[in-house]
Structure formats: structure tokens, C-alpha cells
Image (tube, rainbow, N blue to C red):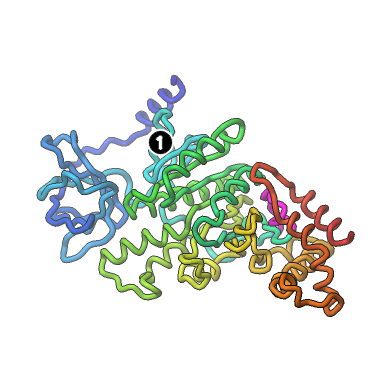
């Protein structure tokens, strides 16, 4: 308690008072959460407080964010519901436009999209700010991926080895196990800082995740940013930007950061809602171009830094609507990411968890970070799995004659062992070295 009070007093001493008169605007229109405000001229991304109660001193107020301007008036979107909003309500600017709070004060805490605590703890005294859109550098400022990244999952470590600073997507339909796989990686991954952004997900998942992972020694190096599905679309995007900005701040300090975002699709949905409100036409199956550009900008902010030697290893879930792997969000994410893990509903229905479709999954940096023997074993494993799945119906019907294909004969004989290798209990952690050793033992038996 004394420590937080000292930090608050220190911030008060450093604060620069403003003596200029504060201007305010008036709400002139409200249409589906989109507000028109007259009398103010603020940049896009600026936050404002709208006084809607009977008192003009802020007793009843709402927060809104500037998302555009038209005809000399600002267009704003509420960060909450429009209940009790009235015409002529006063709008006053607050905070620093385009800046988000970051810093060590957030370690061990769970916050919302505005950086406010949701874990019942004391207020967070953040002493640093970071641009919401990130600090853009040149393409050559990014160091290449050269070191393997241990995620604690045997199938991923051995067959789609990830690298420090890589951006990976977990792609699947609803209810196939994306969140469970993320839970396994968050529990078993080796990273100095773990930042988890739960964007547009169920509130129950938020409470479950915080209860599981914000305990014990791991809490001191973890941050959770949670914006459930019932929140405003601009608040969901703000939450994704806040988590990414925190990861960039710690990377600039030289740390190895694991950024987990669940899910990238919900961010695209939020971008679509805002773009359609602003009148942007839908292009790819109802997604305006700006919605797909939003996820591209977020993903590109992860990676290695040559200046600080820090890294952001990004892990993003992508919801394939209707199990369609050609969905615009899935296709856009697959094109910009450095690797993808595909979860199969068929494998999940057979009881294989995690339901990783190894034949469809890929790590684009694996060949650069593993030794040739590991590559050979991984390719042989993939070939056996792909051959068996391609001929599975023939084998089950008894139409295949043994001896016609030696590789398929081996795949049939090893099918039980191959499936057991891909399966793993949720709370079990299998290190990278152990995964590679078990793969070598299996393929050379």
C-alpha cells in the first residue's frame, strides 16, 4: 500500500499542470453507437469523457474515442453502452491522444482495454506511454529468427519447431481446441514476459485463464489484457493494441516476450463493425479493406529487434468461420504469418488432443533453426501421417492389400505410435530436447 502511494505521489510531482481553458463539445447525433460531436477538433484515437448525468461535474459520464470526422464534426464511438446518453451532452477530451500506458507496473495484473485493473487489485500507476500504432522501423531493423522457441507441446516442438521472434497462427473452427492449445503453450513456454490478450472471447474464459495462470511464480512475469465479446468494437481493438504496445515496450528493454492473442478474428470483426459504421463498403465477403489491414498491422509489430536484442514471439488464434480455411481473415493471416498450426475437427472427434493436423501445419523458419537429422525425422513423420490419412478409408474398408505400398504398410504398422506421439495431456509439459529425442527414437525404431 505504501509503495503504490509513493508511486502516485512521485507521478504527481512529475505532472505538468495545464492552465489553458479546457474546451468542450456537444453531442449532436447518435446512430448505433456512432456519435457526432460539434465544437471540438481532436485527432483520431483521442479519448473523451461525455457527461450524461444531471450534474455537469462528471458525476455521470461515458468514455468515447474519436474514429473519424465528417462535415466539420467529429465522429466518435462509445466505449460502453448508449444508455442514458442525451442530445447536447458535454464532451471533454482526456488523456494523451494516440498513447497507451505501459510499464513494469502491469506485471502480474489483469487489465481491460483501457489499462484499468479488473483483478480487484489497487490502481496501476503506469509511468510510461507507448504509441498505440507502435514504433515503426525499417525492414532491416528486424533481426532474423535463429533460435528455437520451446512451447512445451511435443507435436509442435518436434514437427513444426518455432523460433524466437516468429509469428504463428492457430487456425481452426469453433470448439476444436484453440483456447486449450493456447493454455498449454502459456503454461509450458519458455519466455521472460508473457502477455495474453483475450479479445472478443467469453467472459468465462477470461476468469478461467486468470485463475489458472495468474498464480504462483509465473504471475510476476505475466500480463492479461481482457476485453470480452460484449464490449464495444473500438475497445476490443484498443485492447489488442494495448497488449501489443506492452510487448513492444518490453522488447525495447531487451526482454524475450511471448505475445498470445485470442483471437485475431475478433479483432477483424471489430474493425469491420467500425468500418461499416463509417460507410466503408465491404469487399472480401463483407470485410472492408481496413478491417483486414488492422490485423496485418498488429501482426507486423511482432518479431526480433536488432537494436535491443529483444524479441516478440507472437501466437495468434484465427477462427475459421464454418471451418472454411479460405475465409478472408484466415487467408490474410496465413499470408502474413511465419507459420500456422491447423486444428482438425475430424481429429478432435476421434479423441486426439491437441487435434493438430500435422500435414496442413507449417513453420516457415524450422529449416533455419534445427539440425539436418531433425529435419529428416520430421519429414519422414509427416510423410507417414499424410500417406495414412490419404488412404484411411481404403484401410478401414479392408480394400488395401498389404505389400502394395511399403510406406503405407509402415504407416499402418506405426499408426498407434504416431497418434500417441501427437497426443498430450493438457497439463503435461514436454521440453524441446525431449520432443526431438522422442521423435528420433520413434522414427529410428
Q: Looking at the rendering, in which quadrant would you find the C terminus?
A: bottom right
How many numbered marks, from 0 up? Answer: 1
Would you identify the image quadrant in which residue 352 lies?
bottom right
**Taking 189 as reference, is 64 left or right?**
left
Would you identify the image quadrant in which residue 30 lies?
bottom left
Q: Extreme bottom residue here?
A: 404
Q: Nearer the viewer, residue 298 or 12?
A: 298
Would you identify the image quadrant in which residue 95 lies?
top left
> Is residue 144 depicted above or below 222 in this figure?
below
In the rendered image, residue 390, in percent from the top left (x then y), is placed at: 70, 74
Q: Extreme front residue here?
A: 398
> Is residue 407 depicted above or below 298 in this figure?
below
Q: Looking at the rendering, in which quadrant would you find the N terminus?
A: top left
Secondary-structure class at tag 1: loop
Is residue 150 visible from the viewing direction of this image?
no
In the rendered image, residue 63, in percent from the top left (x then y), is placed at: 26, 45
Rendered residue at 45%/44% (across/down)? 225
Q: Where does label 1 land, which residue? A: 118
Amino acid at each position: 500500500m505504501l509503495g503504490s502511494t509513493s508511486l502516485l505521489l512521485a507521478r504527481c510531482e512529475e505532472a505538468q499542470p495545464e492552465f489553458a481553458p479546457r474546451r468542450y463539445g456537444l453531442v449532436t447525433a447518435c446512430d448505433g453507437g456512432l456519435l457526432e460531436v460539434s465544437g471540438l477538433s481532436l485527432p483520431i484515437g483521442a479519448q473523451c469523457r461525455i457527461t450524461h448525468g444531471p450534474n455537469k461535474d462528471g458525476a455521470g459520464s461515458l468514455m468515447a474515442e474519436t474514429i473519424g470526422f465528417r462535415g466539420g464534426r467529429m465522429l466518435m464511438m462509445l466505449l460502453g453502452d448508449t444508455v442514458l446518453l442525451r442530445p447536447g451532452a458535454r464532451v471533454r477530451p482526456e488523456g494523451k491522444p494516440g498513447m497507451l500506458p505501459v510499464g513494469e507496473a502491469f506485471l502480474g495484473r489483469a487489465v481491460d482495454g483501457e489499462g484499468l485493473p479488473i483483478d480487484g487489485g489497487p490502481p496501476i500507476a503506469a509511468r510510461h506511454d507507448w504509441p498505440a500504432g507502435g514504433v515503426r522501423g525499417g525492414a532491416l531493423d528486424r533481426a532474423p529468427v535463429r533460435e528455437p522457441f520451446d512451447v512445451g507441446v511435443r507435436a509442435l516442438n518436434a514437427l513444426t519447431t518455432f523460433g524466437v521472434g516468429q509469428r504463428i497462427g492457430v487456425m481452426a473452427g469453433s470448439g476444436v481446441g484453440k483456447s486449450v492449445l493456447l493454455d498449454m503453450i502459456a503454461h509450458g513456454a519458455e519466455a521472460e514476459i508473457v502477455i495474453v490478450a483475450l479479445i472478443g472471447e467469453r467472459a468465462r474464459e477470461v476468469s478461467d485463464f486468470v485463475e489458472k495462470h495468474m498464480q504462483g511464480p509465473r504471475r510476476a512475469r505475466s500480463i492479461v489484457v481482457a476485453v470480452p465479446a460484449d464490449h464495444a468494437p473500438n475497445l476490443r481493438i484498443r485492447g489488442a493494441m494495448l497488449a501489443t504496445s506492452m510487448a513492444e515496450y518490453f522488447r525495447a528493454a531487451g526482454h524475450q516476450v511471448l505475445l498470445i492473442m485470442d483471437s485475431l478474428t475478433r479483432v477483424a470483426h471489430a474493425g469491420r463493425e467500425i468500418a461499416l459504421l463509417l460507410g466503408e463498403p465491404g469487399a472480401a465477403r463483407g470485410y472492408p479493406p481496413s478491417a483486414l489491414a488492422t490485423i496485418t498491422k498488429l501482426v507486423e509489430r511482432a518479431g526480433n529487434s536488432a537494436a535491443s536484442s529483444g524479441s516478440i514471439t507472437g501466437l495468434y488464434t484465427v477462427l475459421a468461420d464454418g471451418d472454411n480455411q479460405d475465409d478472408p481473415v484466415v487467408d490474410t493471416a496465413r499470408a502474413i504469418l511465419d507459420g500456422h498450426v491447423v486444428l482438425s475437427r475430424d481429429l478432435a472427434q476421434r479423441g486426439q488432443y491437441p487435434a493438430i493436423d500435422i500435414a496442413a501445419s507449417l513453420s516457415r523458419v524450422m529449416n533455419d533453426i534445427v539440425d539436418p537429422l531433425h529435419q529428416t525425422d520430421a519429414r519422414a513423420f509427416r510423410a507417414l501421417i499424410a500417406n495414412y490419412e490419404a488412404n484411411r478409408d481404403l484401410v478401414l474398408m479392408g480394400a488395401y492389400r498389404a505389400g502394395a505400398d511399403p510406406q503405407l504398410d509402415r504407416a499402418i504398422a506405426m499408426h498407434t505410435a504416431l497418434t500417441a506421439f501427437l497426443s498430450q495431456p493438457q497439463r503435461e509439459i514436454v521440453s524441446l530436447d525431449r520432443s526431438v529425442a522422442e521423435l528420433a527414437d520413434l522414427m529410428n525404431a
